[in-house]
């Protein structure tokens, strides 16, 4: 067997992996995406090796220069990736060593196990910031749509049945709250991502006097991991990112569903710009919210990625196991899906108009104020349970007569309770009803205006 055709670790082997095994185990076809992070980590590692005397200054400079060249070739698409070199780490190292003899010293006190853990942390760190930026853009679009329609009333729903009037701005700001919690969760996850595992070696560190803090500082980490065995096998930080992503996808899906309903002829509350809808190949009149449906549908794969990773990690013995290589595509897919969905959703909201007449027609249903009618009686000393019953009977009577609640004569009201007076009709003034909802978190126009101001200030870039 010609030793030179063997992989980097070929010293103890009499043959290279079988072709099928090679194709089955290689990861360079997808982990090449980590290349620039891998180079960043290698540069920091080389500088540390020079600092502790494991590389001369000249060797370090040659390695750094070589790595930078490789980085440029990768960016330009000129780098030759080799599947027989398994992964991104060995591809870069082998190429470096071909150019720079000192490259053979770069892997001193390092294993692909701590190297890949580092690359993944660097990648997740950037993805967290990218997703957070998209969340902010989405929140701004929601606040904008809310503020240009700040006085439009719609029915609020429970069980998808008309319940009580709200401002459409209040409904939209509910999503701003959700996406803000998502943003905060990513902040929290970031703290656990931003710890440097390099120096943990394969699992038991190194006999060389490493300066791990120096590496961590160069790479912008807040500290170094404290247990080498944990550090090479920990993927909790990816689980957290995928879980945070699952909640984001859930919120996106709920918003997509609301928008799909609102865009239907039955609701007609919004009109989405043509560019964000598609037609039917058969029915000429159709304007379909396909993009929204896909925003809703993408949730499945984002949940799937989380469950796949949790399943992958469950029951793994300490420490590194090759199973862990399966973390990458799940992570990449969630990151890509989140960025794409958030981007499309934001652009669509920026190109959506609220149809005031349709909203207000729906909100003018006096039954929406049945609860306010009960509150009217409560203010006159009737216990709430009794008031609820009285108003229920009135609603039934109106239904029997085929009349809206506010078209019943005063005598009918009085028949159900002597506490009703001529002022009862004021209850059915939607604006008045909204204005009365003044407690914190309720949709009085003054409250909603305050919330809009708060968000505008918070989200100002
Ligand atoms: N491609 C591997 C992964 O993604 C890198 C680490 C390989 N380590 C090993 N001992 N085979 O997990």
Image (tube, rainbow, N blue to C red):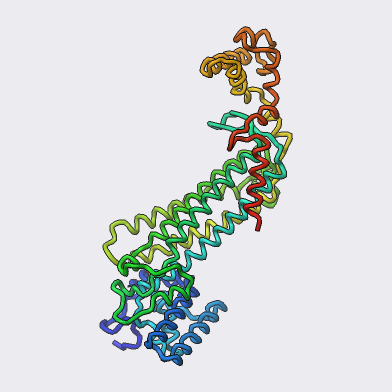
Quarter location, residue 396: top right
Quarter location, residue 201: bottom left
Q: Position of residue 83 (x, y in %)?
A: 41, 76
Identify whether 203 is placed above or below 141.
Answer: below
Q: Quick check: 394 left or right of 304?
A: right
Q: Position of residue 458 (x, y in %)?
A: 62, 52
Q: Quick check: 184 left or right of 414?
A: left
Q: Quick check: 395 left or right of 59?
A: right
261 and 182: which one is in front? 182
377 and 271: which one is in front? 377
* Picture mark count: 0
Q: Position of residue 198 (x, y in %)?
A: 38, 73
Answer whether residue 65 is visible to the viewer in this image: yes
412 and 446: which one is in front? 446
Identify whether 143 is placed above or below 41.
Answer: above
Point out the image quarter for the C terminus. Answer: bottom right
The residue under the point 25% across, 83% down is 12
Q: Quick check: 349 left or right of 231?
A: right
Quarter location, residue 305: bottom left
The residue under the point 67% across, 31% down is 435
* Name of the residue lying farthest toward the right: 357
Q: Position of residue 137 (x, y in %)?
A: 62, 55
The residue under the point 41% across, 57% down is 239
Q: Quadrant of ligand 1?
A: bottom left
238 and 12: which one is in front? 238
Point out the image quarter for the N terminus. Answer: bottom left
Identify whether 47 is placed above or below 377.
Answer: below
The residue under the point 70% across, 48% down is 273
């Amino acid at each position: 067997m010609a030793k030179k055709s063997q992989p980097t670790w070929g010293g103890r082997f009499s043959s290279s992996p079988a072709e099928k095994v090679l194709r089955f185990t290689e990861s360079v076809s997808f982990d090449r995406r980590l290349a620039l992070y891998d180079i960043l980590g290698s540069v920091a590692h080389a500088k540390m090796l020079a600092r502790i005397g494991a590389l001369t200054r000249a060797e370090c400079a040659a390695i750094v220069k070589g790595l930078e060249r490789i980085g440029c070739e990768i960016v330009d698409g000129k780098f030759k990736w080799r599947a027989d070199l398994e992964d991104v780490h060995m591809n870069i190292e082998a190429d470096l060593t071909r150019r720079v003899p000192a490259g053979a010293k770069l892997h001193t006190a390092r294993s692909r196990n701590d190297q890949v853990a580092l690359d993944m942390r660097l990648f997740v760190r950037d993805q967290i910031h990218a997703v957070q930026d998209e969340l902010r853009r989405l929140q701004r679009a929601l606040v904008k749509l809310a503020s240009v329609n700040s006085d439009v009333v719609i029915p609020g729903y429970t069980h998808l049945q008309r319940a009580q009037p709200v401002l459409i701005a209040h409904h939209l700001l509910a999503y701003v709250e959700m996406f803000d919690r998502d943003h905060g969760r990513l902040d929290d996850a970031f703290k656990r991502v931003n710890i440097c595992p390099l120096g943990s070696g394969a699992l038991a560190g190194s006999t060389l006097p490493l300066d791990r803090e120096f590496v961590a500082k160069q790479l912008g980490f807040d500290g170094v991991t404290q247990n080498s065995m944990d550090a090479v096998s920990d993927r909790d930080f990816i689980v957290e990112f995928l879980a945070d992503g699952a909640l984001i996808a859930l919120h996106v899906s709920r918003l997509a569903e609301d928008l799909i309903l609102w865009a239907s002829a039955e609701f007609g509350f919004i009109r989405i710009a043509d560019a964000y809808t598609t037609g039917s190949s058969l029915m000429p009149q159709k304007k379909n919210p396909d993009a929204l449906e896909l925003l809703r549908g993408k949730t499945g794969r984002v949940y799937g990625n989380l469950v796949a990773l949790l399943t992958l990690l469950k029951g793994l013995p300490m420490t590194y196991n090759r199973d862990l290589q399966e973390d990458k595509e799940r992570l990449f897919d969630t990151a890509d899906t989140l960025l794409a969905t958030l981007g499309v959703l934001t652009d669509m909201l920026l190109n959506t108009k609220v149809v005031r007449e349709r909203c207000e027609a729906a909100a003018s249903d006096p039954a929406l104020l049945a609860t306010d009618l009960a509150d009217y009686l409560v203010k006159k000393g009737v216990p709430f349970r009794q008031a609820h019953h009285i108003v229920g009977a009135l609603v039934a009577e109106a239904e029997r007569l085929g009349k809206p609640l506010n078209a019943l004569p005063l005598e009918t009201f009085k028949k159900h309770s002597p506490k009703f007076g001529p002022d009862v009709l004021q209850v059915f003034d939607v604006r008045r009803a909204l204005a009365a909802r003044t407690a914190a978190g309720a949709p009085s126009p003054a409250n909603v205006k305050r919330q809009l101001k708060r968000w505008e200030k918070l989200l100002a870039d």
